[in-house]
Amino acid sequence: NMNEGILDTLLNHGANINERNGYDDTVLHAAVRVNFVYGVKTCLTKDVKVNEINCDGETPLHLAKSKEMCEILLDSGALLEARDSFGFTPFLVAVQCNVRTVNILLQRGAEVNVRDNRGGTAFHYVGNNLETLRTILDYGGEVNIKDNEGNTPLHIFIDLQLNSEFIELLLERQADVNIKNNAGFAPLHLAVLKDQTSVIE
């Protein structure tokens, strides 16, 4: 691989592996971003710190986009619950970016009901991904967890006008249809406001 050869050559000629770029990314961050496994392993054998943060407070694990990358970083001491500037853990970032690392992070013990700085949970970021929602629930995602505005996942999904499969899955998992948010709205109120006939039925 050409990149492997270039990396080795630069390091053999005294390139500083602890150098940072304009975003304050370490070489390890940069290698993780592009899923360059050899580069990541090289950094780790040269004792680059695995939990260094960039200008957004992200550790390399926040940037991992593959199961293999997560495993390499976690096996080298990456912190599962490290928080970036927004209070996102690697798990919340994975849910948000719809990446294939949600399962491995949960298998390795990521906190499924973690909240970001604004009180948002994985349910806020699951978007239109039913499979990820099911995974979150299977790993103990609290079906009636409230955010800072008192909204439960049911409130959130009705507000986002996600299709009824999402609502049905929450109801199957015992979502409470009568919980009111801080503004005094129950999910049914929101469904009427949004004119969501299928949800109302």
Image: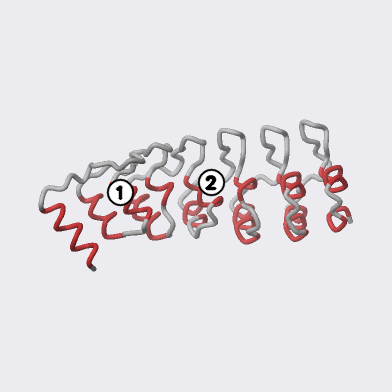
Label 1 CA crowd tier, 10 Å (few <14, some 14–19, many 20+): many
Nearest the viewer among 193 and 184 is 193
Residue 101 in the image: state x and y as whole percent.
Answer: 48, 56
Label 2 CA crowd tier, 10 Å (few <14, some 14–19, many 20+): many
Residue 86, relative to residue 97: is it above or below? above
Q: Which mark is residue 28?
A: 1
Q: What is the three-letter code of the residue carrying label 1?
A: Leu
Q: What is the three-letter code of the residue carrying label 2?
A: Leu
Q: Residue at x 26, y 56 (%)?
A: 39
Quarter the N terminus occupies:
bottom left
Q: Is mark 1 on a helix, strand or loop?
A: helix
Q: Quadrant of residue 176?
A: top right
Residue 128 in the image: state x and y as whole percent.
Answer: 65, 57
Q: Where is mark 2, residue-wise?
A: 92
Q: In the image, is 124 to the left or to the right of 10?
A: right
Q: In the image, is 61 to the left or to the right of 184?
A: left
Residue 200, relative to residue 185: is it above or below? below
Q: In the image, is 197 to the left or to the right of 94?
A: right
Kindly report which numbered mark, 1 or 2, lies closer to the viewer in this rendering.
1
Q: Which residue is drawn at 28% across and 41% down?
A: 20
